[in-house]
Amino acid sequence: MRKLIAIGLTALSPILMFANFNNWPANNENYTYQSSLENDSTAIVHSDCPLLKRNCSGKIKWADGTIYVGDFKFGKPHGEGKITYSNGEFYKGEFVRGYPEGLGIMEYNDRSFYEGEWSNGIKEGEGIYTFPGGHEYTGEFENDVMNGFGKIKLMTGEIYEGDWKNGLADGNGKFTRKDGSRFIGKSENGTRNGEGLIVWESGDTLMGNWEDGIMVEEATYVFADGTQMISFWENGELQNDLTYIDSQGNELMGSLELVSHITTQTDSKFLASASEKLPLVFYGFAMEFHAMQNYDLAEKHLDMAYLIDSPANDTPYREMVVQLTANINSERVNKILGKGNVLFRF
């Protein structure tokens, strides 16, 4: 199994981390191990190995075109072999009493495949599943779905690593975004739930609470220099009041409305003290609205982050803002065209 995992990791380059696996193969009966091996004997059109023969190697063919080649025991696949179904899908690996058991690989006709451990014809143990779009999961399986600890790398380069339950992120985990920031926290049924922490490469952090993937109550930025910015959320809506705590512990009150007039409000103590922090603050707000697929509000806050952040500051935020704006535009187009299954939202 160590060799199997090593092979999978070399192929890797992953809301929190929250997956919507409606297209997961285990949820589709067409992907479950087909019971051709248990068909009535009248469906068999050819067999090299009769039921009474203890050990045998050969070929068996069913009326629907399914073919098995390999080891047999008392007429059933047992040992090493390969079964190819009439639709082109195949399983190659170990069999016990007619079912995949042990190590094996299953390739589906949508070009997805699973390589790993099996038990009684279903995925059980450790393995690697590659989605049709190229996303790759490496980790534990139970009852044919992702259960336990695992890591998934999306084609976007984003990575989630943590606990899974019934094919969804559930428990503790870490999601690394394209911009290098990380969400560390809890999920339930595929969405963020409970306390969590977003950490940027700059050392700045955002502490918050989520319910069903939506930020609620107080959210606090703690910046690398020890200063803080506190915002408030209700049912996924950002409230108007902001509180900045400077390095001396002074609390300065501001508002979204005030910041929106930053070009004319030059005498504000809040803006004078907090202005360097505001680009990241609004970028973080935009990320939350993006996760909720509220693209209009996401773009509004990205515009604010871009406006506030002077090129002279030489911060990484402008590049991050440009990249997230491009991602939103791409998702808008894909949504119109009905493309782009989104596995993670945060």
Image (cartoon, helix red, strand yellow):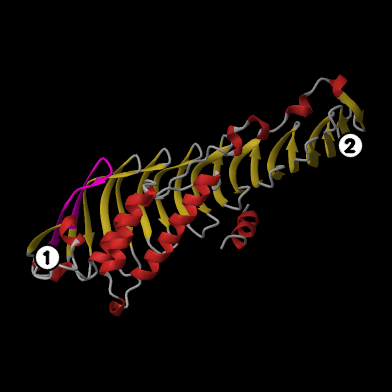
Q: Element under label 2?
A: strand
Q: In this rendering, is residue 64 above or below 138? A: above
Whether residue 251 sits left or right of residue 281 in the image: it is left
Whether residue 18 sits left or right of residue 261 in the image: it is right
Tell me the kind of residue under disc 2. Lys
Magenta residue span: 230-245
Which residue appears at 87% of the width and 33% of the height? 60
Residue beneath disc 1: 270
Q: Residue 190 falls in which quadrant of the image?
A: top left
Q: Are marks 1 and 2 in contact (CB under 8 Å)?
A: no
Residues 177 and 186: in front is 177
Q: In this rendering, is residue 217 above or below 266? A: above
Binning the other alpha carbons within 10 Å of mark 1 as few (below 14), some (14 to 19) or many (20 upward) gives: many
Residue beneath disc 2: 59
Q: Residue 286 falls in which quadrant of the image?
A: bottom left
Residues 4 and 153: in front is 153
Looking at the picture, how far across and down is residue 91, in whole percent?
A: 74, 41
Q: Is residue 120 visible?
A: no
- Examine the structure image and report whether residue 278 is included in the region drawn in magenta: no
Considering only order in the chain, which callout, 2 or 1, is on the residue closer to the N terminus? 2
Looking at the picture, how far across and down is residue 258, in whole percent?
A: 15, 59
Residue 326, disc: none
Q: Element under label 1?
A: helix
Q: Nearer the viewer, mark 1 or mark 2?
A: 1
Q: In this rendering, is residue 334 above or below 221? A: above
Which residue appears at 89% of the width and 29% of the height? 53
Binning the other alpha carbons within 10 Å of mark 2 as few (below 14), some (14 to 19) or many (20 upward) gives: some
Which residue appears at 45% of the width and 56% of the height? 329
Tell me the kind of residue under disc 1. Phe
Distance of label 1 from label 2 (alpha carbons): 79 Å
Looking at the picture, how far across and down is residue 117, in whole percent?
A: 64, 44
